[in-house]
Image: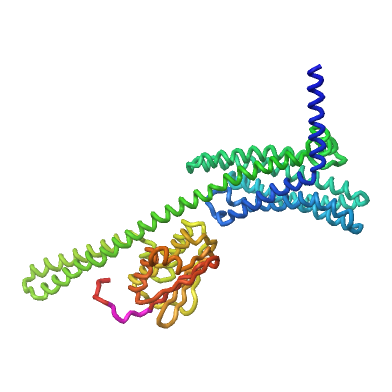
Amino acid sequence: MKLLKLRDECADAVKALHDVLKANEILIYFVYGLVYFLLGFAIALRSRSFTSNFRLARSLWYLAGFGFLHGASEWGSILIPLQETWMRAGSGLIMRSLHAVQVALSFACLLRFGTGLVGDTFPRYHWLKKLPGIAFALWLVVFVVLGQTMAPDYKLWHNTSLALSRYFMALPAAILSAVGLFAQVKDFHAMGLPRMGRNLSWAGVTFGIHSFFSGLVVNPAKFFPASKLNTETFFATVDVQVAVFRALAGASVAYFMTRALEMFEIESRRRVEEAEKTRAILEERERFGRDLHDDIIQSIYATGLILESAMERVETGEVRETIRRALERLNRIIGNLRAYIMGLNPADYQADTLVERLDVAVEEFSQHYPVRASLAVESIPEQTISGERLGHVQAIVRESLANVGKHARASHVKVLVKFSEDQVEVTVRDDGAGFDPDEAKRKTGGQGQGLKNIARRVELLGGEFRIKSSRGRGTELTFTFPTKVTNQGPLRPT
């Protein structure tokens, strides 16, 4: 008797749950759509990081597109039936047709995400990237043909089209996405990020679950297996709408993918640390090279001048020959030192023009920071500028770009060079968060060390600089300097 009573109580509980879910079907579909929309939104917020070296980053936009389109399509499943009650005849057909296309397009985006992951990881399957476009095009042709043959019953046309899109796009898309995510795990373990790898593994598992509920449980249609396994038979068997399981699977995908996207922050921090180390090494090399050039080579050069002067006063042929050999040796030493200085920063010393030097600085910045950088040149061709002054200009631009990478939270930075007859103007402009210069001075008690370095180098160039910035509108640093220096200072060997 107790077992029978327990069975009856369980049956009543299931029936009550069935009634609650049926009564709140609109809310379920709203949450279902919201889950996927938030997945797309979370990925889109990371769009600045899609220049990452991780293969996963190359396909993330397609997953974001799937989230936006699929979330909106599920909201359409709620709104279209409500609007059909008061809309004119024929409007419902148009809306359901557009809804079916939207659903299919969302699955095409997910399929492109999966094929992109597999194709980038296994080059021999690179051809899979063409599959989403072909599948969507074929589905569209079938959709139009079915529309002509099932015109009187547009609900059957709609359900049949949705079922086909799930079978031929959603199902392989979820499976390939799972396979592609599992294939990325080794990259994270190789970089010492096992926790991120586990998140991707769980995301792959949830995509596998998603493949069943979204790819096999379809809208009712008159062909097998849609006639046997569909949303109605599933609900009659389980007493829970399939949308509940799809929403749970989508929420799991969103959670684990969002956790996995933390990899971009870790990668960005590592890039900044690496850039700081590289910058410190370059500055030390520059200082060391300048000391060698200004002190050691100057001293050797001066010694050579003394020997040349002594040789002119010596009459003995043997002594003159000894001094000449000593001068040749000094010249070889100077040549070796210059070659060593060039080796400290070969890209800089091999670049003879200002544009080449700045191109090196921009390229270095792009390699270390996830910010798009570009160099633009205006006006007449540049005049000849000494190597020492080129080094100062390059160091100023490097410092400015480093500030953008560390503080600006920008997506793009542009270096603009303008030449005139007697001066050069260089501008570093970003589209980042910007700042209040007056407030920054109050907090730091003046200029930061980076701006002090810039100010000092601009002063050595005989120029001037200014900063224009405001919150939310980016920052623009501009400095100008003369191309010709009236006071050359002490003569140095070149």
Q: Position of residue 447 (x, y in %)?
A: 39, 67
Query: Which image quadrant is residue 381 in?
Result: bottom left
Q: Quadrant of residue 206?
A: top right
Q: Is residue 398 visible?
A: no
Q: For the N terminus, which image quadrant?
A: top right
Please state the extent of the stretch shown in magenta in the rendering.
482-488
Residue 108's x, y, as percent?
A: 72, 50
As displayed, is residue 153 above or below residue 21? below
Query: Colour mode?
Result: rainbow
Q: Nearer the viewer, residue 322 or 226?
A: 226
* Residue found at the far left of this picture: 316
- Give x and y (percent) for residue 60: 62, 51
**Residue 327 lies in magenta, yes or no?**
no
- Give the residue at x 86% y 41%: 221
- For the stretch drawn in magenta, what is the main secondary structure? loop
Residue at the image point whose x is 45% and y is 66% from the top = 439
Camera sees residue 376: yes
